[in-house]
Image (spheres, rainbow, N blue to C red):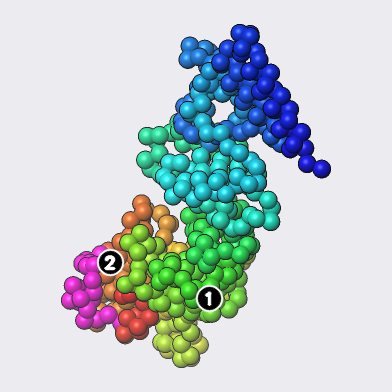
């Protein structure tokens, strides 16, 4: 049996009593307002709730500006309302375990009744795309989830919560965050109090915050518009939110999971720019899988081929301006692992490389072999923990030098040059950059006949910037003699570039 008529009757009796007291002169108007609010709160099924909508709101010991300040509240802080005094609300902050008074204009009282849930969701829709209101939006999402019946909750509030959490993490990780450190730190505390899990990773001496993604996982588990599913999948598979401390096996399992998440999004009815984003992310994931599978001794061809197809399938006319960096990022990852899609030549050349397992787990030893002699002679020997792409081996016509691709990391490929000198054979290693392993590759692009020179293509990301160059290298020192940002701008490069390289490379995309 409903108790609503009984509560309404009690409230009516209380109001009649208040009117009698006013006529008798026993109470004032402020007391009436406070008692009326208390009565209304008592008539509801749960304590009234207020959400702080401004930053640096003082929680005072009494309902006046001169009263002692108990604490400083921030947008998104949720309070229990216990009464009204003048234009102050008497509240209790359960997070700080303190009571006090706040100005009524600095908070918004919200109803947690099921019939009022739609109003809360409407506010969530507004705040979802309002920069700087992430903590406030999360508080309204939490209020909606408390108010709405379980059967009525769909994917929308979780999509909003994930979007807000991810945007707050990006704000906190921004290079310009120091200008607003206090507010961001307070908003992060509010988010943590609401159960939003933000994790930090140190990269290049800076802390990067990332949302753990629980809300996005719920979006993928519930019926949702395909665009929301695409947004959730992209948020869950970010490369910059992978813990750099992960071990190779854990990284491999994570990449497999990321591939499965991206495969769950149906691209058919999505706008072209969303399809581009999914292709770019999947290209990078498949390139990482190709590297990991080759390193584990498994077949990496299918993953590498899919990575190349995804990159080639990007419609540049529908590539959003904010996705240009993602396109370059994916191209570098695919370029680093592209040799997994190429077969080893059936007929070995005069100079060839042979590989064997080294003494340590994961180690590969390389022998440079001269096949001109009846019994192949080992000319040079070196071991590495990187992946050796034997299909990339290319010797010059004189048989005095050979270029080989060696990939120590998923997004980092080096060029090893074996060459004959006055004191025998030596091995020189040319990295994509001298700044340290970030993301990039350098690859052989051709030999210059009659000269101790070779051609190379290089792409690298350093300090968040992407650089691509086509270079003429001195074979003796591997120093750059000339370079250009386009192969046709360098006459020697344009004339002597290797036909197989031109057909296979992603540097000419």
Looking at this view, name the residue that lies furthest to the right.
1
Q: Where is 24 relative to 73, above or below? A: above
Residue 485 colored in magenta in the image: yes
Q: Nearer the viewer, residue 344 or 57?
A: 57
Q: Which of 236 and 54 is in front in this view?
A: 54
Res 303 label: 1
Asked whether residue 237 is in view, the answer is no
Image-based side of 222 in relation to 457, left or right: right
Name which of mark 1 and mark 2 comes first in the sequence: 1
Residue 446 location, quadrant: bottom left
Identify residue for label 2: 469
Mark 2 lies on a secondary structure that is strand
Residue 11 x %, y %: 69, 28
Q: Nearer the viewer, residue 69 or 441?
A: 69
Residue 112 location, quadrant: top right
Res 48 label: none
Residue range of the region highlighted in magenta in the rendering: 480-498
Quarter of the image where the N terminus is located: top right
Residue 373 x %, y %: 45, 88
Residue 332 colored in magenta in the image: no
Residue placed at 64% from the left, 62% from the top? Answer: 221
Disc 1 to disc 2: CB gap under 8 Å? no
Q: Nearer the viewer, mark 1 or mark 2?
A: 1
Residue 320 x %, y %: 35, 64
Image-based side of 238 in relation to 488, left or right: right
Mark 1 lies on a secondary structure that is helix
């Amino acid at each position: 049996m409903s108790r609503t008529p009984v509560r309404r009757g009690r409230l009516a009796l209380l109001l009649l009593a208040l009117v009698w007291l006013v006529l008798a002169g026993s109470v004032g108007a402020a007391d009436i307002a406070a008692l009326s609010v208390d009565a209304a709160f008592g008539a509801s099924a749960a304590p009234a709730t207020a959400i702080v909508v401004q930053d640096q709101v003082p929680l005072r010991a009494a309902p006046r500006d001169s009263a002692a300040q108990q604490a400083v509240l921030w947008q998104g802080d949720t309070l229990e309302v216990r009464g009204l005094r003048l234009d102050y609300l008497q509240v209790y902050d359960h997070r700080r375990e303190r009571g006090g008074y706040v100005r009524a204009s600095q908070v918004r009282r919200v109803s947690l009744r099921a019939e009022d849930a739609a109003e809360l969701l409407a506010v969530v829709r507004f705040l979802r795309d309002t920069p700087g209101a992430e903590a406030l939006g999360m508080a309204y999402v939490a209020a909606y989830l408390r108010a709405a019946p379980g059967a009525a909750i769909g994917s929308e509030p979780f999509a909003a919560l994930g979007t807000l959490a991810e945007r707050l993490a990006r704000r906190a990780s921004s290079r310009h965050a120091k200008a607003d450190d206090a507010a961001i730190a307070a908003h992060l505390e509010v988010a943590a109090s609401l159960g939003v899990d933000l994790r930090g990773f140190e990269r290049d001496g800076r802390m990067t915050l990332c949302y753990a993604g629980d809300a996005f996982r719920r979006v993928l588990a519930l019926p949702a518009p395909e665009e929301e599913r695409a947004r959730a999948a992209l948020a869950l598979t970010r490369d910059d939110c992978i813990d750099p401390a992960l071990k190779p096996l854990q990284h491999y399992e994570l990449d497999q999971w990321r591939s499965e998440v991206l495969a769950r999004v149906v691209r058919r009815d999505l706008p072209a720019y969303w399809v581009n984003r999914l292709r770019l992310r999947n290209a990078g994931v498949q390139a990482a899988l190709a590297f990991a599978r080759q390193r584990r001794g498994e077949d990496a061809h299918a993953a590498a081929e899919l990575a190349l197809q995804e990159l080639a399938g990007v419609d540049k006319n529908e590539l959003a301006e904010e996705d240009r960096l993602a396109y370059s990022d994916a191209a570098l990852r695919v370029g680093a692992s592209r040799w997994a899609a190429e077969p080893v030549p059936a007929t070995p050349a005069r100079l060839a490389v042979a590989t064997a397992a080294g003494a340590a787990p994961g180690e590969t030893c390389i022998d440079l072999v001269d096949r001109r002699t009846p019994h192949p002679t080992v000319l040079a020997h070196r071991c590495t923990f990187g992946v050796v792409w034997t299909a990339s081996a290319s010797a010059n016509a004189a048989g005095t030098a050979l270029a080989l691709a060696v990939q120590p990391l998923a997004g980092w490929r080096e060029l090893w040059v074996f060459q004959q000198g006055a004191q025998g054979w030596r091995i020189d290693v040319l990295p994509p950059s001298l700044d340290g392993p970030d993301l990039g590759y350098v690859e052989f692009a051709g030999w210059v006949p009659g000269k101790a020179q070779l051609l190379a293509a290089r792409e690298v990301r350093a300090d968040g910037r992407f650089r691509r160059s086509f270079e003429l290298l001195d074979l003796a020192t591997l120093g750059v003699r000339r370079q250009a940002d386009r192969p046709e701008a360098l006459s020697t490069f344009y004339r002597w570039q290797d036909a197989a390289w031109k057909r296979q490379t992603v540097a000419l995309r």
